[in-house]
Image (cartoon, rainbow, N blue to C red):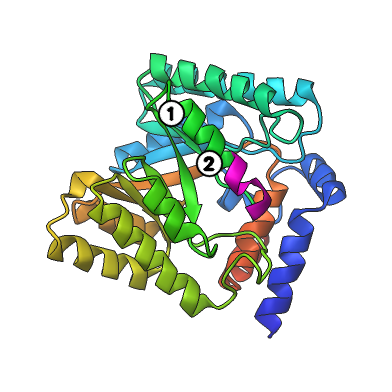
Amino acid sequence: MLAEVSKNVFLYASQSKGLNKAAKKWGLRFGASQVVAGDTIESAIKKVEELNKKGLVCTLDHLGEFVSSREEAIEATEYNVKTLEAMAKAGVNSNLSVKMTQLGLDIDRDFCVNNMRRILAAAKKHNNFVRIDMEDHAHCQITLDILSELRQTYDNVGTVIQAYLFRAHEDVKELKGIPLRLVKGAYKESPEVAYQEKEKVDENYLKIIEEHLLSGSYTAIASHDHQIIAKVKEFTQKNNIPRDQFEFQMLYGFRTDMQLSLVQEGYKMRVYIPFGNDWFGYFMRRLAERPQNVAFALKGLLSK
């Protein structure tokens, strides 16, 4: 019960524009620096280089929420292009993850699509891949519609499917052949559109993972749950699914020992690295996901 209350508090805070604005002034405090790789492209690239040396591949995500003007969206687009160029120059092994609301999706659909095309063209030039992060349920269908449109020109783009949504399994079937990151889901969604019980989310999560793997599609399993990971290992071995058809993904700063152990076992392990000064919403959602993360953040704060 207490865990549910704290989860709701953190999710509510993650959507607060006032707190988000204040957090930009605070800087990476309150334990956030443990899960956010600095506030510049340079700091993020440095972290990617460190992780690459350990056998980990990465994806960079320039954090940003509550974009309300075309100027902010254009600035975010240019920053993402700049990030792709910096990765290419440094020769690091990292993809890019983007949120379309940061690129103006809530302002104008076509404007956002044009911004996405700029990013994908830059990624194509540098032989890189871009993942469109899935946001809340209200943005789900439009995200998939835009992905379909973009895939007509660019094959270096995929998205994310969230297992807690009732629609997840049908979406995965529709997206056969497209590289997907499969996650449990991190937004607060209503019982009308999403499973509320952990057991049902886990059940659906394994169902969509198996569906995408068996279809021969490239699958990123993004989870810190060791039981899920063990079941995926068992499933892929049993069904002779080659290791170059899937990868595991985890967030920067979480379960680092498990990340390294997967690499040692010969699995591809990608670390999702957020960076930038717009870190507050991301950090609050991480605290909401697992009660253990609160203790983790406090420990980081007190050690400073």
**Magenta residues, as a range?**
137-142
Give the residue pinned by disc 2: 144
Instruction: Look at the image and say whether residue 138 sits in the magenta stretch.
Output: yes
Q: Secondary structure at mark 2?
A: helix
Horizontal and vertical percent position of residue 120: 48, 22
Residue 113 at what x, y percent from top left? Answer: 60, 25
Q: Residue at x 65, y 72 (%)?
A: 191
Q: Secondary structure at mark 1?
A: helix
Amino acid type, label 2: Leu
Q: Going 44% across and 56% down the picture, which residue do you hit?
A: 170
Mark 1 neighbour density, 10 Å: few (under 14) some (14–19) many (20 or more): few
- What quarter of the picture does the N terminus occupy? bottom right
Q: Nearer the viewer, residue 253 or 8?
A: 8
58 or 140: nearer the viewer: 140
Q: Amino acid at mark 1?
A: Arg
| Residue farthest right in this picture | 18
Picture coordinates of residue 144 (x, y %)? 53, 41
| Corner quadrant of residue 51 | top left
**Cα distance between the residues tagged 1 and 2:** 10 Å
Of helix, strand and loop, which mostly describes the magenta segment?
Answer: helix
Which mark, residue 73? none
Does the image show residue 252? no
Image marks 1 and 2: residues in contact by CB distance under 8 Å: no
> What residue is disc 1 on?
151
Q: Is residue 103 left or right of residue 240?
A: right
Image coordinates of residue 274 in percent, x first then y, are: 56, 42
Residue at (62%, 18%) from the top-left corner?
78
